[in-house]
Structure formats: structure tokens, C-alpha cells
Image (cartoon, rainbow, N blue to C red):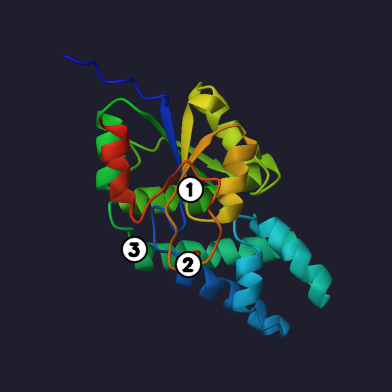
Amino acid sequence: MSRRRPLPYDAVVFDMDGVLVDSEPMHVDAMREVLRPLGVAYTDRENREFFGQTDLEVFRALRARHRLPVDEHELTRRRTALLLRLTRRRTVPMPGVPEVPRRLHAHGYRLAVASSSAPELIRATVDQLGLARELREQVSGLAVGRGKPAPDVFLETARRLGVAPGRCLVVEDSRNGLLAARAAGMACAAVPCPATRHEDFAEADFRLAALLELLPILLR
């Protein structure tokens, strides 16, 4: 009788927006609502440009580009407050959520969320999904300084989990997220969402059509 080859992963690290929740429309709406009173029409092209970056990084770039009179910290605060209100009303789980994290947790994987969103927004979203027990480690790009494609948020997540980066599998929906995972020395499963299906995921270890396809890979 042949033995099953053990998988090389001890931890699974989920991006949040576009992987666990279908939040892209909500995030774009919030950005436009914050910028509209300042006379800025936030475009879909700009939105694609900033995938994976923190609000501080995005607003810093937009402030320079449009000469905004409000600093990036205040703009981040306004957008986070708006998104918290919207999250409580409009959280839409992606297909496979909460089933996939719950089954992986039950199977013994260490799990975490690594997102460019603000810490309080990550907490609110995880609570809305009913996954606070499974996703105890929640790491925000705002807490580490640089958003994706820099590897900082993933390296901090591995440190908190107590797992070597090479033993982590990241689940991402954007190319910037994929590049951040690779820069951190982690494997990556790409699950593009509608907003990122056009992006290049050639370096991904797995390319999945839906999150549920992760289970046959990890529960062998």
C-alpha cells in the first residue's frame, strides 16, 4: 500500500478582499464617496493600479496626484469609518466561505488573514463571517508599513504564526498579492476575483477557479 506524500505546508494565509469576501464594489464605492467632496473622480483604472496597497499608500499617491488639501491619515480614517458601517450591512462571503477555512482549521492547518485593510476592518469582516475562532491571526498592512507587492505583511504573518515562510501557502486574488507572497518566500494559490481575472498569475503555484478547489489540494 503506497503512502501519501505529506504536503509541504503547515499554514494557510488568506488575503481578505476578493478571497474571503466579495468586497471590491463596496471598497470602490467607499473610495469614491471619500474623494467626491474633494472634487476627485476615482477611476476604475486608478483602482486597478492600487490593488494590494494600504490606504495610506493609496491616499499619499492620490494626494500628490490631485493636490488634495487633506492628509492621507485623515483620508484613511474617513474611509475606514465608512467601510466599517458598510461591512456590517454588505458583507458578502465568497463561494467556499466559511466552509474552506473551517475545514482546513479542523484538519490542523494554522490559519491567518493578511490584508492591506485596516486592523479594525479586518476584525469586523472576520466577525461577520463567523470565523474569529479559525482566523485568530489577523495582520494588516497598515501595521507593518508597506502594502503589497512588498512582502512585509506576509513575513509578519509567518512570524506571528510561528511558521517558516517556506511552509506557508498564501491564497490571493491579485498579482500584487502573488508578487508579495513570492517575495516572502511563500507558495501561492491564485483565485482571481471578477476584478482581477485579467491579471497575470503565471508565477502562482496553483491557479484556481474557486476557493473550494483548495480542499482537494490540501486535504489529501
SS under mark 2: helix
Crowdedness of circle 1 by 10 Å Cα count: few (<14), some, many (20+)? many
User: Which residue lies under the disc numbered 3?
Assistant: 92
Quadrant of the rendered structure where residue 70 is? Answer: bottom right
Q: Which mark is residue 15?
A: 1
Amino acid type at circle 1 is Asp
Going by the image, does 72 lie left or right of 138?
right
Going by the image, does 36 lie left or right of 102?
right
Nearer-N-terminus badge (1/2): 1
User: Which residue lies under the disc numbered 2?
Assistant: 24
Crowdedness of circle 2 by 10 Å Cα count: few (<14), some, many (20+)? some
Disc 3 vs disc 1: which is toward the camera?
1
Work out whether 8 lies above or below 156.
above
Amino acid type at circle 2 is Glu
User: Residue 48's x, y, as percent?
Assistant: 61, 68
Name the residue at 56% across, 58% down.
200
Amino acid type at circle 3 is Val
Nearer-N-terminus badge (3/1): 1
Quadrant of the rendered structure where residue 214 is? Answer: top left
Q: Relative to the observer, which residue lies in front, 48 or 67?
A: 48
